[in-house]
Amino acid sequence: MLANKRIRSYITYMKNKPVLVVDSGIGGLTVLYDLVKKEPNCDYIFFADNLNAPYGNKSPAFVRNKMLENLHMLCRKYKPQTIVIACNTATAVSINTVRKTFSNLTVIGTEPAIKTAVEENKKNILVLATPNTIKYNKLLKEYKSNENLNLNLLQLPNLAMDIERNIDNLNILQKQIKDTLSKYIGQIDAIVLGCTHYIYLKPILRKICSTDIKIYDGNNGVCQQTLKNITRKNKQGKIFVLTNKISAGGILISAWNYLQKQGVSVCAE
């Protein structure tokens, strides 16, 4: 799936403008998977900024600068019809700047699905996210001040990279996740995954959590917004996955294979 020079040449001359999906690593592949499943008749380019991952504990200025640098390069080469920021951290700290800079394009961000959980009458909610998402996401701040909610915001600065490093054996993280959640089990009725990387852990989370705890992620909302703003093809589209760190190619392939094997059990409720 990783684009070589011949593939890059092909996508440079795509007649149908692709949807550009970007993240710092494999998390955004969960968004891409959902998009392809819901709308296969579209061309997609996924770009992973593995060279600068993770974004979750970098300075906001660093993340904004890298987002703009990467998007300028990608938009110049591939002329996308829509940009999807498939990263909660990048959305929280850079989406306003990206929208202002690329005002000719629709830019869709990713946010923790806290609103969905509240609308479904969940009152005791645990949000798992990176430090930057918890610090800068406006929606989380808004709900944190809601006295009718028992909202716990748990920063996990290393989990995204733990998932990247162990994508071929995620079960090795089960004890770590169980220990992290132990003090919340029995006290919560919902878990909101505030990082697209964490979606890979859904099968493990379901083993650890009781059936009374519902698990939410923001991918469905991202897909709905994206599908409202894209032009389809009349036939099956193509998917290209790019990275700026050659050694990360195997991780991206493993992550995509994992999603294809797990399918709906990971990416949909």
Image (spheres, grey):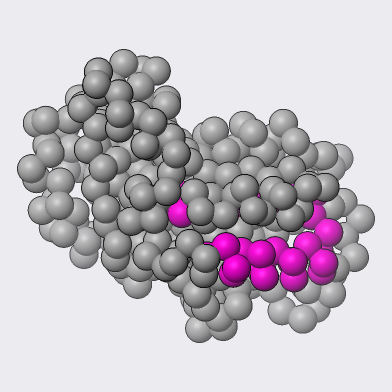
Above-or-below relation of 162 to 88: below
Q: Is residue 262 visible?
A: no
Give the image location of residue 171, x and y in percent.
23, 60
The N terminus lies in quadrant:
bottom right
| 67 drawn magenta | yes
Predominant SS of the magenta segment: helix
Q: Which residues are magenta?
A: 63-89
Q: Residue at x 29, y 46 (%)?
A: 128
Pick the front one: 122 or 136: 136
Percent x, y of residue 63: 52, 65
* Quarter of the figure that contains the C terminus: top left
Residue at the (77%, 39%) spot, across then down: 230
Q: Residue at x 60, y 58 (%)?
A: 22
- Which residue is at the front of the view, 201 or 132? 132
Would residue 93 be counted in the magenta stretch? no
Q: Residue 11 falls in which quadrant of the image? A: bottom right
253 or 74: nearer the viewer: 74
The residue under the point 67% across, 38% down is 226
Left or right of 22 in this view: 262: left
Please tell me whether residue 104 is drawn above or below residue 247 in the rendered image.
Answer: above
Q: Is residue 27 left or right of residue 178?
A: right
Residue 55 percent coordinates (x, y): 45, 64
102 relative to 126, above or below: below
Residue 162 appears in the figure: yes
Left or right, 94 with respect to 59, comes to: right
Q: Is residue 255 left or right of residue 179?
A: right
